[in-house]
Image: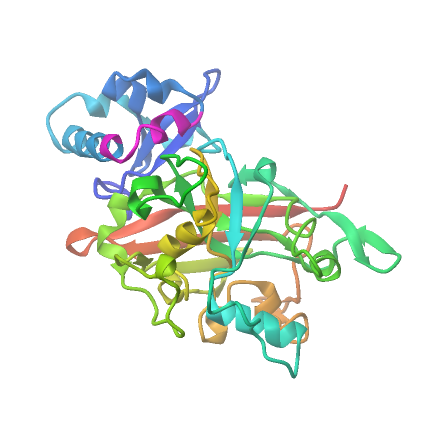
Amino acid sequence: MTAPGYGVEHLPYGIYARPGEPPRAGVRYGEHVLDLAAALADDVFAAPALNPFLARGRTAWRETRERLQELLTGPGAAREHLVPLGEVRLCLPFEVADYVDFYCSLEHATNAGLIFRPGQEPLPPNWRRLPVGYHGRAGTVVVSGTPVIRPHGQRGADDFGPSERLDFEAEVGFVVGAPSPMGGPAGAFEEHVFGVTLVNDWSARDVQAWETVPLGPFLGKSFATSVSPWVTPLDALSAARVPGREQSPEPLPYLRRTAPWGLDLALEIRLNGETVSRPPFRGMYWTPDQMLAHLTVNGASLRTGDLFAGGTVSGPEHGQRGSMLELSWNGAEPVKLPGGETRAFLHDGDVVTISATAPGPDGTVIALGEVSGTVRPAG
């Protein structure tokens, strides 16, 4: 019996290491990891990152997935290469080439505008016409379980010190496999994007507020971004695809959807083990295919290992907000936790865990690999 959400219909990819051995690629199957290099007799999976496999492209991704499903459901010897999860260390699944973060939730963008610009139009004039985004820092993308040290920064004029408004952002990330050349837009979304991973874009709100004008987020975001150790292939999410939200005004031609790439992902955020929010990704205003189109329309190239995320996922209800900024309304309405504690923003020692599920084929459920991090005191 496999763990719910991790059956043969899923098979997310990751990198693992057994004690005393170098990291290598595997897929999760229940409470085990399948050693891909051994099961498939393919040295590309002996690498310490998924990038060499990702670079092979869509045909190889699909053929490999089909072969794994055959091996795990047939009488072959693949099960001899299953390693219990409890015996391995999970590593960053791919070497991150570039990291781009978007701002694609209408509810999150509206809430942030109401908080920071009360009495004004919450959305800037460009928001409904393009997926707003910024370039992050690839070198501080870390795997789930890595402690997050409270960052220092400028919190205002002549005010420097540890962030007092540390926050999480529940996001969904997209991992690029096949690259594209400079000078032209990328091709179809599914030809370039290999899969999906959960993301926590940790944010120092006081640092971010002071530095954002005029060029946007910088040190308030770049200190750490956590990702799941598992990447779910797009092919595992075929039953979760939805058309995407209606858009007005109609986007420019390069942003018009040609396929349903909205995803019905139900996120859950737990703070110290208690659920504080359940954001719905299917309600995002801009869908990931539109993000990719905008990312490359100016001729910017894609590289194997690029990661782009859709920004904080928030829904219309209070219990669907994807950050403490919104849940506590910038500290004005602290969140009540069981046991009597309250939180406006994160305390040292707090543990934030983001998980998600999606519909799978024939009524099954896909459980995306969760991403978790513990806040440590400033150094």
Q: Quadrant of the N terminus?
A: top left
**Residue nearest the observer in this picture, 278 or 131:** 131
Chain part drawn in magenta: 49-60
Q: Residue at x 45, y 75 (%)?
A: 316
Quadrant for the C terminus, please: top right
* Above-or-below relation of 260 to 90: below
In the displayed structure, does residue 88 sit left or right of residue 56? right
Residue 36 found in image quarter: top left
Report whether 139 appears left or right of 278: right
Q: Residue at x 56, y 55 (%)?
A: 272
Answer whether residue 105 is magenta in the image.
no
Farthest left residue?
Answer: 75
Image position, residue 365 (x, y; %): 26, 53
Q: Residue furthest front?
A: 183
**Percent coordinates x, y for residue 242 in the rendering:** 27, 62
From this view, report whether residue 30 is shown above or below residue 101. above
